[in-house]
Amino acid sequence: MAAPGQVGASEVTYPWGVFRRLLTPRWVGMFAGLVVVVAACVLLGLWQLGVARDSGRQDAVTAASTLERAPLQQVTKPHSDFQADYSNRAVTVTGTYAAERTLLVVDRRLDGRVGSWVVTPLETQGGTVPVLRGFVDGTPASVPQPPAGVVTVTGTLGPGESPRDGAPLPAPQVRSIDLASLVNEWPGDLYNVVVLASAESTGPAAGLTRVPPPDLDAPLNLRNAAYAVQWWVFGIFAIWMWWKMFRAEQQAGEPVAAPREGVTT
């Protein structure tokens, strides 16, 4: 029950009054303007977020390229976790290829071509490391053979891949460089990295196209990310201001039911 001089909430014609006022030309126009402003803020925020990602990736690539090329055993050890700063890290590694364990990673693409990766384990004094020697068109019946004897590989580091589902493939074909599987198939200690070969001391790799380093999962550029958040905050602020203005006008002109008989004012 309402106190003397007050009107009960059930006596205020609030819902219909709000709806009716929203349909007036003035508020329809203001709502349309709000939609435009919020949409612009959202799109500008997404644009700044894209800039932040691109800038962060460029910074990460630049940082990786400035590191001095080092022997693999100075960068990581067998069975060690793959660290984020290993991506595109320039390394050298010396050993002997185990040609009989070469893999053909199918369904790969390079510059519009469809083919396979040729991956061969390189056995070193510290352990075995998978080397992505290059790309071949299609799925060749015979795998290009690596050079015999001791070879020094120059390249960059990349992570292994997750397994891919699909029907079983005939050896030596595989769907991914799944290091978790290879550790049980290749003898010796396995490095938890893949070396993307850019050169071999024995000369060019006949029949192979070198595979460039992959894009990095780089951190965001914080300045542009802050700009993105700022635009979204502007959008939220615009919604709040629109609602505040509407509520102020609605409360100022809100119709009130007449007091019931017997209620003093």
Image: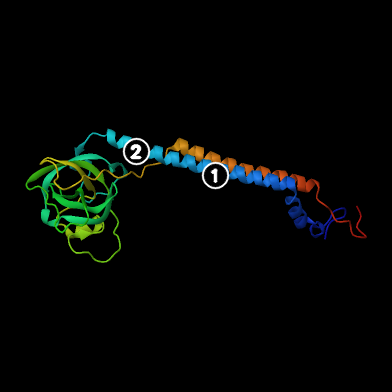
Q: Is residue 243 visible?
A: no
Split into 4 quadrants, where in the image is the N terminus? bottom right
User: What residue is shown at x 16% (from left), y 52% (from top)?
Assistant: 120
Task: Indicate whether 222 appears above or below 13.
Answer: above
Q: Nearer the N terminus, badge 2 or badge 1?
A: 1
Give the image location of residue 190, x and y in percent: 19, 52
Kindly report the distance in space between the C-alpha atoms of the residues bearing marks 2 and 1.
27 Å
Numbered mark located on residue 92 in the image: none
User: Label 1: few (<14), some or many (≥20) within 10 Å?
Assistant: many
Q: Residue at x 21, y 36 (%)?
A: 69
From the top left corner, tell me how far across and down residue 114 is, in percent: 26, 53
Image quadrant where residue 166 sits: bottom left
Residue type, mark 2 in image: Ala
Helix, strand or loop under label 1: helix
Vertically, is 91 above or below 194? above
Q: Tell me: 205 left or right of 9.
A: left
Badge 2 crowding class, 10 Å Cα cut-off, few under 14, some 14 to 19, many 20 or more, is many
Secondary element at image label 2: helix
Residue 185 at least partly seen: yes
Count of marks, rendered view: 2
31 lies left or right of 133:
right
Frontmost of labels 2 and 1 is 1
- Residue holding disc 1: 42
Residue indicated by mark 2:
60
Q: Residue furthest left?
A: 149
171 or 187: nearer the viewer: 171
Under mark 1, the amino acid is Val
Q: Residue drawn at (29%, 49%), measured in percent from left and top?
A: 112
Residue 210 lies, with reference to residue 99, above or below; the image says above
